[in-house]
Amino acid sequence: MPLKGFESLCEKNAEQIVSRDKGNPQYHKGINVAKVYVTHYQIDGIVIKSGDRCDYLLMNEENKIAYLIELKGSDLIKAAKQLETTEKVLHQELAGYSLRYRIVANKCKTQEIRSSEYRKYQIRWRGRLVQKTGAIEERI
């Protein structure tokens, strides 16, 4: 169900939905091949005004899949915490959706990817966390 009180950033059956912050090269692109009903929200500063929160939320309304998207410079652990906090704050709105976690970083350090703190998120979100450098383009 669309977030009450907020307007989607994309058209109802948009073919491509891009999450990008001004001035930063990294982005997430959702490709809506089936042209299903989708909604897209800027979380940071709009839906959640303060505290740790991710940048965007992309929702496939027909298949009930929600993508929490964080565009980050390089701090993967902080990015994962922002995704986790957003999930907790929007828990009620996301009930009934299968959650996917996306981190698009500008650069990643191998030691951070392998750190025990980041690994706990990889284990908890097994198969639902995707982290890449530069861009993520995926069918949604």
Image: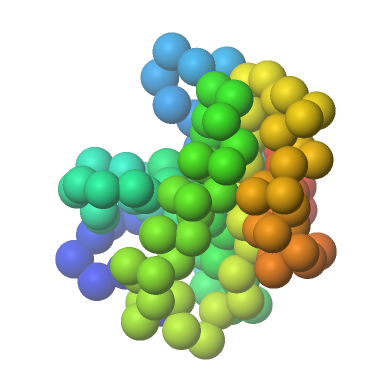
Furthest residue in direction front, as rendered: 116
- 35 or 18: nearer the viewer: 18
In the image shown, does 139 or 121 lie closer to the viewer? 121
Could you tell me if residue 98 is visible in this image?
A: yes
Q: Residue at x 80, y 40 (%)?
A: 114
Which of the 4 image quadrants contains residue 124? Answer: bottom right
100 to the left or right of 69 = right
Vertical position of residue 74 compared to residue 116: above or below: above
In the rendered structure, the answer to whether residue 2 lies left or right of residue 130 reads left
Q: Where does the image place residue 17, in percent across and percent down from the top left?
A: 56, 44
Q: Quadrant of the C terminus?
A: bottom right
Percent across and percent down for residue 7 are 27, 56
Residue extending furthest toward the top: 23
The part of the image, by quadrant, that contains residue 62 is bottom right
The residue sitting at 80% across, 28% down in the picture is 110
Q: Residue 21 placed where, x, y %? A: 43, 26
**Which color scheme is applied?**
rainbow
In the drawing, does residue 13 fall left or right of residue 116? left
At x 65%, y 50%, the residue is: 117
Image spot of residue 91 (x, y percent)? 39, 76
Classify residue 1 as left or right of residue 137.
Answer: left
